[in-house]
Amino acid sequence: METEFKGLQFKFDCKPDFGYLTINVPAGKMVKVEAAAMAGMDTNMEMKTKFKGGFKRFLSGESLFINEFTAKNGNAEIQIAPASPGDIDHVYLDNESIFLQNSAFVASGSEIDVQSKWQGFTKGFFSGENFFLIKCTGKGDVWFNSYGGIIPIDVNGSYVVDTGHIVAFTEGLDYSISSVGGYKSLFFSGEGLVCRFSGTGRVWIQTRKLQPFLFWLFPFRPSKK
């Protein structure tokens, strides 16, 4: 799926712990960037903000703000720092689609259509993990990040991933949502819901999960006596 030497020129720094992205944008071209992720840019960059998802999804936390940066009067460079402390990766889509977890989108080329929610993946989620998908479709670059490191897994048959560890997956995979070991395991074992992938494609998983980290931090929180 990913093809070298296509799309925009870019480089990564500080991988894999605190990934940092620099994109070279040709004159007159535009890149879409996650809101608040711009760390630095040339002065001839012009920014516009787009709101994906509408007001109803904004109230439910399922909207997506994207800033569009256009290089005016010459080539320009933009540096992007994702919010999450983790890795960053790239795919080049050739009239294909990739699905990202809600916090994974970092940036894309101008020809990529970014949808704030894909309705087909909402069944069965009652674990409180606030999981919805961003669907990126078209021809061009897509950059995404993780909490922790990123591990790509090529699926040819079937594979099971905890929903909290999913970063992205390709469109060719089928999937279903289920718990591990029934409802007792779901609430008492520390394991949550899993996604059972089948078919041929690629899944990117992250090496850390936010909720267990918050539980680990909880005993150390400041408290009033």
Image (cartoon, rainbow, N blue to C red):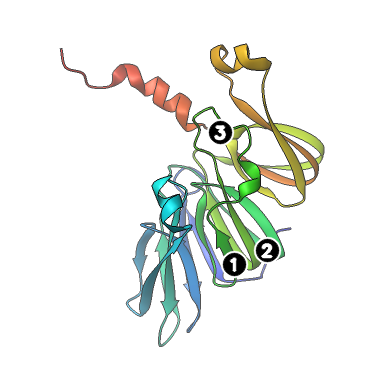
**Which x, y percent locates residue 198?**
79, 39
Mark 2 — residue?
93
- In this view, the residue in front, 153 or 163, is 163
**Mark closer to the chain start, 2 or 1:** 2
Instruction: Work out how far the residue at label 2 is from the one at label 1, CA to CA, in angstroms.
Output: 8 Å
Q: Specify the quadrant that holds the N terminus.
A: bottom right
Q: Residues within 10 Å of mark 2 (few under 14, many from 20)?
A: many
Q: Secondary structure at mark 2?
A: strand
Distance between the alpha carbons at the discs numbered 3 and 1? 25 Å
At a point 27% along the width and 22% down the height, the residue shown is 221
Residue found at the very far front of the displayed protein: 56
Q: Quadrant of residue 125?
A: top right
- Which structural element holds mark 1? loop
Q: Are marks 2 and 1 in contact (CB under 8 Å)?
A: yes
Disc 3 or 1, which lies upstream in sequence?
1
Q: Amino acid at mark 2?
A: Leu
Is residue 194 toward the left or the right of residue 28 in the image?
Answer: right
Distance between the alpha carbons at the discs numbered 3 and 2: 25 Å
- Considering depth in this image, is 51 or 88 the residue closer to the camera? 51
Residue located beneath label 1 in the image: 112
Say which quarter of the image contains residue 8: bottom right
Along the line of sight, the residue nearer the viewer: 65 or 73: 65
Q: Amino acid at mark 3?
A: Gly
Q: Few, some or many C-alpha atoms within 10 Å of disc 3 (few <14, some 14-19, many ≥20)?
A: many
The residue that mark 3 highlights is 164
Residue 112 rendering spot, x and y as whole percentages:
59, 67
